[in-house]
Amino acid sequence: MDTNIITLNENQLTFEPGETILDVAARNNIEIPTLCHLKHTIPTNTCRVCLVEIAGKDELVESCVTKAEPGMVIQSESPKVVAARKEILAAMLATGNHNCAIRDLPTEDWTAFQLNVLAADGKQDLCPVWGDCDLQDLTYRYQVKATGMPVTACKHETERANPFIIRDFSRCILCGKCIKACREIQVNNAIEFGYHGEEMKIIAGDDAHLKDSDCVFCGECVQVCPVGALIPDREFRDDRFKPTKVTRTTCSYCGVGCQMDVFVQDNKIVKIDGADQDLPPNNASLCVKGRYGFDFVASPNRLTTPLIKKDGKQVPATWDEALDLVAEKFEAIGKEHGADAMGLLTSARVTNEDNYMAMKFTRGVLKTNNIDHCARL
Amino acid sequence: MTNTIADIEESDVILVTGSNTTENHPVLSTFMKRAVLQGKKLYLIDPRRVKLADHAEKWLRPMPGTDIAWINGLMNVIISEGLQDQKFIDDRCENFEATKAVVEKYTPEHVEKLTGIPADDLRQVARDFANAGAGTICYCMGITQHTCGTDNVKSLANLSMLCGHLGKPGGGVNPLRGQNNVQGACDMGGLPNVLTAYQPVTSDDAREGYEKAWQVKGMSPTPGLVATEMFNKAYEGEMKSLFIIGENPMVSDPDLNHAKKALNNLEFLVVQDIFETETTAMADVVLPSYCWAEKNGTFTNSERRVQRVRRAVEPPEGPKRDWEILCDIANRMGYGFSYEDSHELFKEISAVTPSYRGITWERIDEVGIHWPCPDTEHPGTPILHTMQFTRGKGMFHAIEHVPPAELPDDRYPFILTTGRVLYHYHTGTMTMRTDGLNMLSPECFVEISDADATRLGIGDGEMVNVCSRRGRIKAKLQVSDKAVEGTIFIPFHFANAAANKLTNAELDPTAKIPEFKVCAINIEAAKA
Ligand code: SF4
Ligand code: SF4
Ligand code: SF4
């Protein structure tokens, strides 16, 4: 059959007409590295890391924009590809402050290298996404030696003028992923490429601070940024290496019911990310409330003990005192005034299980149908 | 929702009304905005020029409280130009002729007089919506929070049936639920007239089934009172006790001064919550409960998808699960309810709830399932009414426009509508504990058009007193191009300038929803 089959690194793979080489690879769990590609958006071959070699062609091509064609024989890790990829990565490192990898220092001893870099920079901190950076990962995977490359000073100041997002332009590799997230996924149209050449920068509005632009702090751009250029303004940055528990759950705010991953350290939520890119209903997107509105959980002002009003003042009580009183009162009121003199308002915020029990309690125990919730309000 | 959220991107024409989607359902709005990027048409019909207008083909601006008029107007155009889906109407619906007769007088020119929407704009929307392969209608509280809210919803259903847009991908009539588990609270029978899955309390069979399952006797066959009626009865002294779970009606209820007197009048008020609120402050007993991040269980989203909630952090010392507290009280009153955990409770829910019968925690571990899901082999139902309507034939309702209960006059010349902002949620019990959200939205504001502000001679950022027949608040004036002359918007989140001191508790006679979206107010500069 002369049908739709390509050969990628010795694997025979079928494809749908219109699929790119990168699509076919991803579908078959063959990883072709890329820094700018974002699922569900239009590919732009900005970073060029996804280069592949096609038999019979002199030039390497970017797999994110090259459509699969019948009979293509493709290599994604050939010596030629790897050499080109290394050059691209080295050039990227040189454009900014990527001191985890680039410096005119011997790189044999990793720890010594790091300590030297920190000393040279006069800094205590590693890059805030050290260990969680796609560029760093690729640099080590391909053993890119960036020794001898000059460190370019950043022309743009770091922005910390809003409560949620830090923009460190010195680490930006201008991959444009954030723009895709903002304009094609969230369609908030807050950011774009600005200026030219050496001056190029991701700008919001008229090169304003995010808080003075159309930005609505959905954080989608932070979630997709492959490096440390967009980072959450939270303590999580400092606690990268602490044990972290991740729990998949449903957002507690609006009725969209976004699926999210909650990151917890020392029993405290430190970060929330959208769940999987292919998981409905939200395909990894979140809004500002869902992503950043979790401080209430660990608030020191949580109610922790039952309160009973005595002489016009609420005072702490034990569970037994409080529950005995409630049960006693409900029984007395039911007897004296009838069940329909009692009512219960359940909540559109609590779980189905809680609501069901509230319903069972009202109808089965109080024996009235006076139950409602505040969804009308 | 009759259809799914993802389905919105499949529509050819999206009609959004009474919903500030980008602020209230931000992620859902991304589906609408992406559809527009793909060349689909979005029409926004809303009293405010909300953000979504930037993405719309056109923004139509009706006077608040005139929804039935413009919906009838759209139907008038569609019928008079013969654009309706006659086959769908003949095969699947009934009572069309009566509706046709009523909408006859709602000509675009007449509707323009009633609503202020230009006749030609109405024609354009009607034609596009009717000619679309699939057209969806998304609406929210802007449609339901009126004295005629139920009729508004029926009118939208009329419009969708007329064009044959129900029961297919990209179509449907889609209410967007404001709070995370409104759908679930309703499904679970948190309503005065129905048990789980909307089985009527008046049905002897249904009640008998429950009495057997729960091993209780003497359930009441008489439908109960809705929330606002409970408050009225409390005010009058007939309601003696209320148990309020996780709500803060002292900020979210209409006509707060009235609500406060009502709660004060109760013999016994129990409030269960995670924080002290304006409402717990009035309680005889306050019971602390676990919050969302500490619970295992399920929520049901707007598209009827039952999804897992999982414990992410260990709960603090002291509080208990909401359902556990209720069990403990019941058992003190002589019952023997006992559940190992939430999972066991969910199994009972599936057993007594026909539309949840096939849903198990195992099945929804990774991806949620849309009810109805009658058995464990059933894949769930993303789109409702594909073959026929729940009641058999789709019923057209002939509905006339009725003006809102309170209209502006000389003393109260402005119309007030209320709602939410992006950065806060409901009464702020949760969002106001995140500093960043407070920084981005620190306080209440009174949104007004430039023209009105100029006429009043009050500038942006100045403090104003706002009063209605029921109360008065003080807040900052915010001149905005979202506002249209004569209409004022105030968010209801903020307890210290509670918009609901102003609102009208007048109810829709069927859905019993207060008319939050229209009341008459006056504004004057506040003396410092
Ligand atoms: S900020 Fe991040 S995502 Fe955006 S262009 Fe720079 S590196 Fe890429
Ligand atoms: S936070 Fe959201 S709106 Fe703001 S720039 Fe990032 S993607 Fe755009
Ligand atoms: S993340 Fe935002 S849009 Fe999604 S459910 Fe939560 S509040 Fe709604």
Image: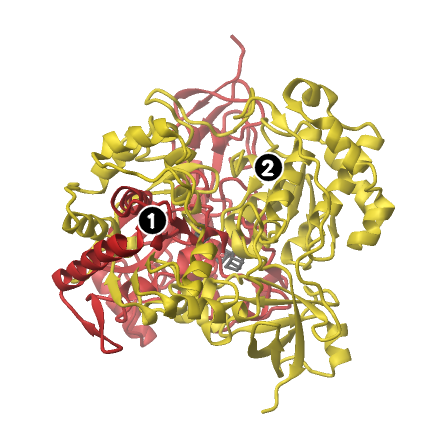
Chain colours: A red, B yellow
Q: Residues within 10 Å of mark 1 (few under 14, many from 20)?
A: many
**Which residue is rendered at x = 39% and y = 29% of the image?**
B355
Q: Nearer the viewer, residue B192 or A254?
A: B192
Where does the image place residue B438, in percent across and percent down from the top left?
45, 71
Q: Secondary structure at mark 2?
A: strand
Tell me which chain the residue with mark 2 is part of. Answer: B
Residue drawn at the location 71% of the way across and 75% of the way down: B411
Frontmost residue, A181 versus A197: A181
Label 1, on which residue?
A261
B392 with respect to B203 (left or right): right
Residue B257 in view (yes/no): yes
Residue B160's place in the image compared with B260, above or below, is: above
Q: Which residue is mark 2?
A: B173
Residue B410 lies in quadrant: bottom right
Q: Amino acid at mark 2?
A: Val
B180 sits to left or right of B322: right
The chain to which mark 1 is attached is A
For the residue labelled by badge 1, is the local secondary structure a helix, a strand or a loop?
A: strand
